[in-house]
Image (spheres, coloured by chain):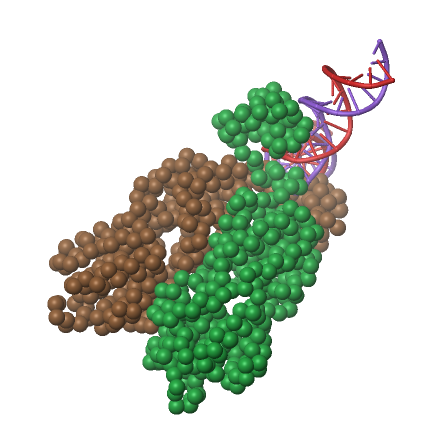
Chain colours: A green, B brown, C red, D purple
Amino acid sequence: MARPTIEDIARRVGVSKGAVSFALNGRPGVSEATRARILKVAEEMNWRPHTAARALGGARAGAVGLVIARPARTLGVEPFFAQLLSGLQAGLSAHSVALELLVVEDTEAEIEVYRRWASEHRVDGFILVDLKVRDTRVDVVEGLGVPAVVLGGPGRHGSLSSVWADDREAMLSIVDYLAALGHRRIAHVAGLPAFQHTQRRMRALRDSARRLGLAEVSSLPTDFSDAEGAATTRMLLSRPRRPTAIVYDSDLMAVAGLGVAGEMGVAVPGDLSIVAFDDSVLTRIVHPALTALTRDTFALGTEVAETLLAIVAEPGLQRDRRTPTPRLAVRESTAPPALGRDS
Amino acid sequence: MARPTIEDIARRVGVSKGAVSFALNGRPGVSEATRARILKVAEEMNWRPHTAARALGGARAGAVGLVIARPARTLGVEPFFAQLLSGLQAGLSAHSVALELLVVEDTEAEIEVYRRWASEHRVDGFILVDLKVRDTRVDVVEGLGVPAVVLGGPGRHGSLSSVWADDREAMLSIVDYLAALGHRRIAHVAGLPAFQHTQRRMRALRDSARRLGLAEVSSLPTDFSDAEGAATTRMLLSRPRRPTAIVYDSDLMAVAGLGVAGEMGVAVPGDLSIVAFDDSVLTRIVHPALTALTRDTFALGTEVAETLLAIVAEPGLQRDRRTPTPRLAVRESTAPPALGRDS
DNA sequence: CCCAGTCACTAGAGCGGTTTAGTAGTCGGG
DNA sequence: CCCGACTACTAAACCGCTCTAGTGACTGGG
């Protein structure tokens, strides 16, 4: 037998389609006895709702959308991202909601996809990541009237809900730690300056340096790629007065930096301390293992998923959820600076 | 104005719903003049098809499904996987087909999802990865009558189509290369023995050793995790007669192995050569950069996507597509073995 | 000049659910 | 005994689109 419909069930039980619908959705309108009979037959016939039919009636689409604007080839080198995805999955699938994933080339294409998916009723909500300083997406998604959660923040995301971690606090904790070890010349290999979180981290570093009286502290923006991370490291280590510690905005860049140090004969942590502003298996498998700011990215993903589902269930709701501040996991890549010629 | 429907367009243009449908789908039945008028109005009103309504009419769902059975937390440490995903995306989105992604705990749950998605008409086809030696999923998916493509092979996937690379040839090329360098004691840190490709690689290594007269060659299965990769390496390097070369079944394990070598003071490539059976940015950012079997995983993904779309478009079609054999990219982690005490 | 054939289009059924309005039947109170 | 309220259910509209059968106008051949 082909896919059974509620019509088939109705016929078999001897009731109307409506009664079957009520019974299957736990809605009042049928007696308990009838409900039981209907459920039994539905089970026997192995009935499953046809999502499209449901969605057509104006109901939920049963999926949420995640669109990422990156050159497709670079996705997936970021362990952070993959972990986030897993967490999202876990949070969504617990409620049988699917995730529609799309990778596009740029923000313009991304916005186009939001427009399309929203008008096609393909998804019930969106997740926005990689928030920029002045992000055009926020206005567009607000305008579409579709529930959305922004990963990042605080602030700067209009009426959309958000889930965020305190980048500032995190950066302060790193600098405090390095300063306590005795480091005075600290470099920060940052990410894309267009990102809000990059800006926050750079500002936190600057403030921290002022407060602690560290003179030679600087942030160097990159595009988050391993290539630029390596190039920037090479440049830093070629300086006559090179930094004694480098903070990288991603674990991938930190590992790339470690590779450059090895190549240039700079001992880690003897001559150079390295801290990664993100953790993953990567930082642990290299030698020496990298000191890293560790957070539960998986949990972050589930948090985002649940927040979004809550908003979908109750439109108009707005939520700003702060996640625990990441903590520094001290490993083997940090040590007091060598008492060198120029310290 | 809320979302416009073809009804709205029909009214505005002064034709029937049917005419609008024909015009918008490039179907015969309307004059060119009318078609142009309809398209113009549709454009003005910013009309988009309602996917659910379309799908309800028995048409395509406009999405394909990818279900992965892994503990959700471990997804995404595999660069291979992320790259594949990007490629899939690229191939699918070129045809405006979405990807429904779900990560589940085990194969049983995976099968349940296939059943559900198929009966809910949520997807038009499936992509199966991580094929096991005797894989229960193949029968189930065949039984569902939903188009599917298996990544892996050759053979052992019933009537389903497949896209595959020649693991055997690849392994032979690695062993030939190492033997040519002078290595005689080669270890293979393999993946899960339940996987077909792990079996093929192990067999290829064995055959190769026999052919080349290499006496001390062995494959050691792991679960593909960095932890087991590291542990196995530690064990191998602690042997009195340790291998002079190790081949790892994934880049992640190779990097983990490199870390262990560094930790144990074993010089790479001086005392030990390392080859990774998979390439990614990982192998390039470490120092020394790892010699690796490189293939275009992104292209593999698009290939899979296109194969699946072809089968969806023409059910009954069966295709076995072999992708180019991966090539060995020689980097800094391989060299002739040291003329040690016991070689 | 008539009829068959083509063209351009319309009307409406159907996809599989949800939901609303309506209808029997029962029950309790006055 | 009648009326109103409530319960359990039915019938049918509706969601937005596709697609088939049907219709009227026009064309061309005999």
Instruction: Name the residue at the front extreme.
Output: A180
Q: Position of residue B165 (x, y in %)?
A: 32, 53
Residue ID at (45%, 78%): A181
Q: Is residue A153 left or right of residue B149?
A: right
Q: Quadrant of the C terminus of chain B?
A: bottom left
Residue A16 occupies which quadrant of the picture? top right
Q: Position of residue A254 (x, y in %)?
A: 43, 71
Instruction: Name the residue at the bottom extreme.
Output: A341
Q: Is residue C18 left or right of residue A323?
A: right
Residue D14 occupies which quadrant of the picture? top right
Of B168 and B161, the residue lying toward us: B168
Residue ID at (36%, 48%): B130
Check the image and report above or below for B233 versus A42.
below
The answer to whether residue A113 is seen in the rendering is: no
Q: Position of residue A77 (x, y in %)?
A: 44, 63
Check the image and report above or below for B304 versus A218.
above
Of A206 and A136, the residue lying toward us: A206
Residue ID at (53%, 38%): B120
